[in-house]
Image (cartoon, grey):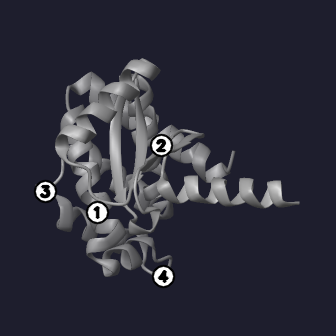
Amino acid sequence: MNPSHGAAKVYAQALIEVGEASGALPQIIDDLEAVRELYDAEDPEFRAIFTSPRIEAGVKRAAVLKAFEGKVCREVLGLLAVLVEKRREVLFDNIVDQFERLRDLREGRVHAYVYSARPLDQAEVERLKRTLEEAGGKNVRVHETVEPALLAGIRVRVGDRVVDGTLRSRLHQLRNHLMATQE
């Protein structure tokens, strides 16, 4: 395991335990997601400043507290402050990833990544979700991606298992079969 993943897991575990003990876990989840969005995409300057080793820790801590105080819960604000103090800001996205993995384990949830040539309607997504939950015995969160190059059908990945029912895959299999029979 990468040492940064180990450290991130320790922070994530502590955050979950504190959230469960205080009853603030739902708020921690929401606030972590909000800060993660800011960290990942909304404001590239935030990530650059937050992770910059050139900015003195005390100055950065004061800026983080000023920026987030009253906007995120005490636990998330505390995490951000500790990361700055210990100069471990670059672990933030790994901590959120580990937090989500631990939360999924606790809640018995898996993620299904569905790729389709066209957007699936809500009834199709719900039917697929029910089927996957019945097959695996766990709660399923569906993440849908549209890939027009698939032509038709869907490909589903849950963990390391992939079921490919796309027309593109079938055509590729047919092509390979025809080429093998011509030899």
Compared across the picture, whether 144 is left or right of 52 comes to left
* Image disc number at residue 54: 4
Q: Earlier in the sequence, mark 2 or mark 1?
A: 1
Give the left or right position of residue 110, taking residue 59 as reference.
right
Q: Residue furthest front?
A: 182
User: Where residue 159 sits in the image (x, y, percent)?
Assistant: 54, 38
Q: Tell me the kind of residue under disc 3.
A: Lys
Q: Amino acid at mark 2?
A: Gln
Which-is-in-front pick, marks 2 and 4?
2
Lower sequence index among marks 2 and 3 = 3
Which mark is first along the chain, 4 or 1?
A: 1
Name the residue rendered at 52%, 60% in the picture: 168
Tell me how far mark 1 sits from mark 4, CA to CA: 23 Å
Q: Residue at x 40, y 64 (%)?
A: 147
Q: CA distance from mark 4 to mark 3?
A: 26 Å
Task: Judge left or right: residue 73 versus residue 12.
Answer: left
Write down the residue under mark 1. Answer: 37
